[in-house]
Image (tube, grey):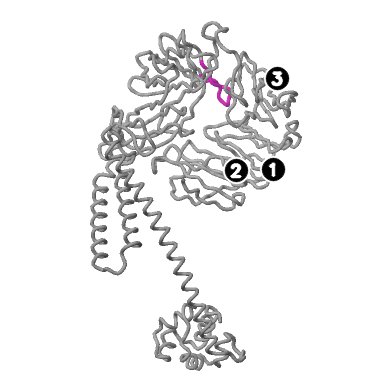
Amino acid sequence: MDSIKFGKFIAELRKEKKMTQKELAQKLNLTDKAVSKWERGLSFPDITILNPLAKNLGVDISELLNCERGNKEKVDVEQAVKEAIEKINKTKEKRKKRNLKIKRITIAVSIIVFILSVALQCVYLLLLKKHGYEYIIDSMPYIVNGLILISAFLVLLLGFMRKNKIKNIIVISIFTLLSIINIAFAINNGFTRKSIITFSSDFSNQLVLKKDRKTGETYFYRNAKILFAKPSEQFSYAVEGKIKTKWLTTDICSITYEDANSNLREFVATYGDRGDGIAYYYVSTTMHGNWQHFTKNGVSTKLISDSKGITIKKEGESHTFENTDIKQFGTIAIVLYDEDTPKYVVALNKDCELDSVTDIIKEGGTITLFEVSMEKTIPEVLNCINYKGNLNDYKIVDMDSYHYRVNNGILYVKYDDEIVEVPGEYSEMLNSFNDDNYIISKEKTVFFYDDENKKYLVYSDDMGKTWNKTELSKDESIESIQFITKDIGFMLRFNDIAMTLASGNIYKTIDGGKTWTVVSSGIRKGDSYSFSTGSRMKFIDKSLGFITIPSVGTYCKLYITKDGGKNFEEVKIPVINEAYDYYELPTFNNGIIYVEIGQGSDGDYNGGNTVTYYSKDDGASWILKEEN
């Protein structure tokens, strides 16, 4: 007999009689717990109870045992009861074994956590602390203490604490007392300072800062080892408010903050060297020459470095910084000051290699110019446009595979081992390309260039063996370009920019780039359509795509299209905290769409970190990706 089916049947009959479990139990001189166990299939009535039970439920005993009204087929009562009890006992035995297995696993995991936590504390207290290391978060030692207490308590509770009530009370009391003491110390010592922790894009370096919540005193920590770091340098000024961090390279991080008088301050954390690591050199001297970066509107940012100092020409203005206005950090970054206010950070990029004789950057090296501000600012990569010394001393063209380089107005692309020249004139295009508006791959290579009053798109489907050219509107800048297949592609182009708004179109090609048609003019707001400066586009397939709409660095919205760009709707993910409001373009891997959401330039929740959500149903629903 099926005890589960039997239990459901008597529950149904009881409800038909409009009786509670307690009322039925009273009629049978039993407790309501007994009736509850019958109905849940956890026990079976005694054979002497069956007749009274059937009578009170208004059925024949055969109907009761057959679990079906009207089914009066004769049943061997003793055999039915015996089978039901045997089944219940087997179920109880399985449950007991499962619970025992869970208990053993819990004990094993608790022992491992206990051993690891104790080992971690021992390494810290006996070895690292005496060498000046600290936990990167002040509350971490108390968290580890908590793990030690909880894991030890679980081992005792599940493995040894059973029948001896006095011992149980003693253990629980000790655990409670130690937990209260640990929490008290954590509240008193673990939250007086706020930790700001961030990693470089390749996780090769870790930035750790600790800011006193009351005084604003802030320390920079070096030699970070995941959980531990050593205090290295105190900021010259107490920090008031939030701290803005920005990795300029994987070994240079800009740290911007305001002091108690609302004055802008800058500190640069450096983790490397562009020379031989032995000799000290002046960064401004290594950069002697003319450097340039072209913006999307064709207006260039220029940096001129000579023996007198550094001049920045940007957005129609020129500002000269004398050598006394330059402060060096490490041997790979400098900050340019206007009186006492930091204006720019200049960083030597990873491709910078110093000539062993002249100590100047060899041809091909680039630098990053970063405007200091508490608002979001975009780093600009500058190339040197004049040769420093004998050209024969430098390699003219060399690069990593599937990268490009412009030299003497010629654009070169390197595939696996072969370097190919791209048709066109690129003298004025040194930094017109961003990460999204050109393509280098085995299947498709796409670039563009301006020639007098015309703009051309040049592309190859066979790794540079043959090239095709298409004329585009000169008045439109190319922001993003992407090919889903060799023939189907999308392109985002702007024709006008006003403040943070941009007008333009999304174009589509189905013939490999020969012809392009407009599929969208932007995100609809009222009766108009527009994009934002900094908008980026990505399509997963010919129908599903995304576009970002940033706003002054404080937030960035994400829109999705499911009809090839004709219509867009906003992606609204129920994030774990409203601070996460800066959506990045999704990535796509193994059929799953991933979206990283940051906090923008105004975010400092949880150290200004990011969260990642993923979707397995083309953006219909989103799930938070748990950290490993």
Residue 474 in the figure: left or right of residue 67 = right
Q: Which residue is drawn at 65% across and 36% down?
A: 505
Please state the extent of the stretch shown in magenta in the rendering.
291-301
> Relative to 547, does residue 392 appear above or below in the rendering?
above
| Mark 1 or mark 3: whose residue is earlier in sequence | 3
> Relative to 255, does residue 103 appear above or below in the rendering?
below
* Residue type marked 2: Asn
* Residue type marked 3: Pro
| Mark 3 or mark 2: whose residue is earlier in sequence | 3
Which of the 4 image quarters holds residue 24?
bottom left
Q: Pointer 3: what residue? A: 423
Q: Pointer 2: what residue? A: 589
State which mark lies toward you, 2 or 1.
Answer: 2
Q: Do the residues labelled 3 and 2 touch (CB within 8 Å)?
A: no
Q: Which of 167 and 302 is in front in this view?
A: 167
Instruction: Categorize mark 2 by other alpha carbons within 10 Å: few (<14), some (14-19), many (20+).
Output: few
Q: Position of residue 565 (x, y in %)?
A: 66, 43
Q: Position of residue 241 (x, y in %)?
A: 33, 37
> Relative to 130, does residue 454 appear above or below in the rendering?
above
For residue 542, the mark is 1
Instruction: Categorize mark 3 by other alpha carbons within 10 Å: few (<14), some (14-19), many (20+).
Output: some
Q: Which of 369 and 389 is in front in this view?
A: 389
Does the magenta-highlighted stretch encompass residue 298?
Answer: yes
Q: Which residue is drawn at 44% across and 69% down?
A: 96
Instruction: Categorize mark 1 by other alpha carbons within 10 Å: few (<14), some (14-19), many (20+).
Output: some
* Residue type marked 1: Lys
